[in-house]
Image (tube, helix red, strand yellow):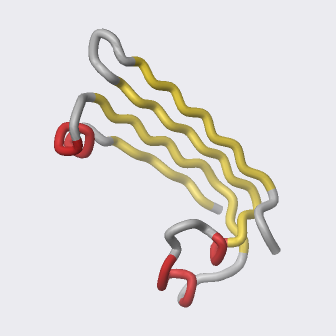
Amino acid sequence: MGWRQSACKINAKFLPRPVYDIAAKLERVNLAQLPGAGRIAERVGGAASGTLQMKTAGVGRDELLGKLTAGASFI
């Protein structure tokens, strides 16, 4: 079982200050095939559906991570 359906929307505004907004929707995705799943794939399996939202602002790693907000819901 592979990816069934996925969609991702990325908005980036650079002036006057960089702001990034990411929204992803996944439907019936094979968890073992997610990029970066690593050892988690050994413990979980099957398919999942859900949404993921992330937003951040700024310049540089520290500022971007410091302002990162995220939310997710999975079924």
Image quadrant where residue 42 sits: bottom right
Image x and y of residue 14, in percent: 36, 17
Image x and y of residue 16, in percent: 29, 10
Q: Is residue 1 above or below residue 64?
A: below
Image x and y of residue 6, in percent: 72, 50
Q: Residue furthest bottom?
A: 42
Question: In the displayed structure, does residue 1 sit left or right of residue 45?
Answer: right
The residue closer to the viewer here, 59 or 42, is 59
Question: In the displayed structure, does residue 69 sit left or right of residue 21?
Answer: left
Q: Is residue 52 above or below residue 14?
A: below
Question: In the displayed structure, does residue 55 sit left or right of residue 57?
Answer: right
The quadrant of the picture occupied by the C terminus is bottom right
Image quadrant where residue 65 sits: top left
- The residue located at (74%, 56%) in the rendering is 27
- The residue located at (66%, 72%) in the rendering is 33
How many discs appear?
A: 0
- The residue located at (56%, 66%) in the rendering is 35
The residue closer to the viewer here, 62 or 40, is 62
- The residue located at (20%, 42%) in the rendering is 66
The quadrant of the picture occupied by the N terminus is bottom right
Q: Is residue 36 above or below residue 18?
A: below
